[in-house]
Amino acid sequence: FFPTVRLYRRGVTGGKSGQLGGFEEYRGEYNVEALSSWMKGEIVKRHLHTGAKYHNIFSEGCRIFGTVDVARVPGTLHFQVGTSKERDINPAFTNVSHTVHHLTFGDAPRSLKAKLPRQYSQHVDPLAKQTFVADKFHKALSHFIKVVHTRFEDSGFRSYQQTHQWSEQTIQRGTTPQAKFSYDLAPVEVVVGKAERRWYDYITQIFAITG
């Protein structure tokens, strides 16, 4: 038949049975319905991304470590791609998925965590070994950390206890995504200790309850 209808596939150089060197050749009837059906069927087959995952395209990343001196007031740490004269990356399409290995406040050694009671040690570094994923483009990740200075009277240890929440936001196209860590250091100190209770305080409380 004439003309011959071929569907070329980019990047394919060889062919199998029914394929001629990187293209498919139409062998059906020459009418609108048949041609449309064949085209739709071929396109659907080429768009089945079996086993493909979004993050397969991100094979490299950055590893950041260090310390930052901050005042005892609320603040924010921002991590994002900066401006550059090079044009090998579009900042608006960067992905800010990340894994936090260690994020603590204060200069206490890491070994201190193991010496604290469990109900307190789990709040020294609550983000440790956690992964936060932005599964689409134009996503920003924000962390909100409340920090309270805590002193343990019996041992003399000092620790900064944290509570943590996080969220994901969709940002406008053209805006550079960022991973943001907002922290708020409480102006108070929590003192953890043991206090003896006198027997007459206990009796007085019982009488107050029973009337």
Image (cartoon, rainbow, N blue to C red):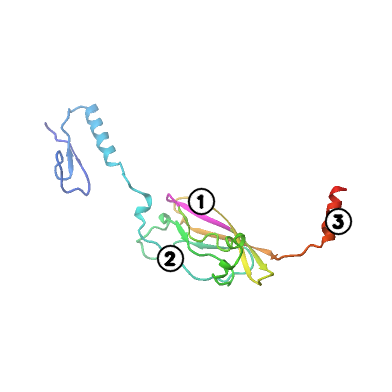
Mark closest to the chain's N terminus, 2 or 3? 2
Q: Which residue is mark 2?
A: 63
Q: Earlier in the sequence, mark 3 or mark 1?
A: 1
Q: What's the amino acid at mark 2? A: Arg
- Mark 2, mark 3: which one is toward the viewer? 3
Relative to 141, is 45 on the left or the right? left
Farthest residue, direction left: 1
In this rendering, would 84 be left or right of 75? left
User: Which residue type carries mark 1?
Assistant: Glu
Q: Residues within 10 Å of mark 2 (few under 14, many from 20)?
A: few
Residue 114 lies, in percent from the top left, at: 56, 67
Nearer to us of marks 3 and 1 is 3
**Point 53% across, 64% down: residue:** 103
Choose mark 2 or mark 1, whichever is in front. Answer: 2
Looking at the image, residue 48 sits to the left or right of residue 152; the answer is: left
- Secondary element at tag 1: strand
Q: Which residue is mark 3?
A: 204
